[in-house]
Image: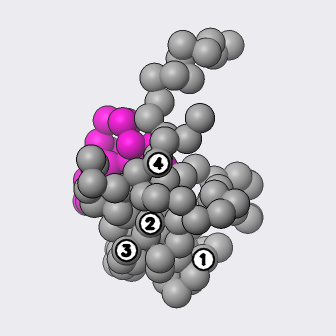
Amino acid sequence: MASIEDLSKLDLRIGRIKNVEDIEGARSPVYKLEIYLGEEIGTRTIVAGIKNNYSKEELLNREVVCIVNLEPKKIANILSNGMLLAAGDEDKIILLTPEKEIKEGSGVR
């Protein structure tokens, strides 16, 4: 079971998707996303397996919730520096987004 201390180790921030690219040759349908996370963090590359659920146009300029302090991981030969939060299963994935617009880089509590 996770404790409050475990949860507090995660740095959750609001980011805005600034660019979306297809990744050719990936084992699963993924996008390479450039996400702006405010002045303190800047822009990060995150690879996300949401291609079956969202078009590029639906994602561009969308605010999303990101974990920004995970160890980088190579996915489809691209270094991914974070993770988007989403809900769902293998067939349908829904991104978690703020109810109202908020400044990029805002912390999630």
Query: Looking at the image, which residue is at 29% across and 42% down?
Result: 72
Q: Secondary structure at mark 2?
A: strand
Does residue 106 sit above or below 62 in this rendering?
A: above
Q: Secondary structure at mark 3?
A: strand
Residue 97 shows in this picture: yes
Query: Looking at the image, which residue is at 70% across and 52% down?
Result: 87
Say whether disc 4 or disc 2 marks the residue closer to the N-terminus.
2
Does residue 22 sit above or below 80 in this rendering?
A: below
Give the CA separation, mark 3 to mark 2: 6 Å
For the residues labelled 4 and 1, say whether their Cβ atoms are less than 8 Å apart.
no
The reply, left or right, for residue 44 in relation to residue 33 is left
User: Comparing marks 3 and 4, which lies closer to the viewer?
Assistant: 4
Q: Which residue is mark 3?
A: 18
Viewer-proximal residue, 109 or 69? 109
Q: Which residue is mark 1?
A: 54
Q: Secondary structure at mark 4?
A: loop
Does residue 37 sit above or below 7 in this rendering?
A: below
Query: What amino acid does circle 3 point to?
Result: Lys
Magenta stretch containing residue 32, yes or no? no
The N terminus appears in which quarter of the rendering?
A: top right
Give the CA separation, mark 1 to mark 3: 15 Å
Q: Which residue is mark 4?
A: 106
- The span picked out in magenta is 66-84
Say whether disc 1 or disc 3 marks the residue closer to the N-terminus.
3
The reply, left or right, for residue 63 in relation to residue 93 is left
Query: What amino acid does circle 4 point to?
Result: Ser
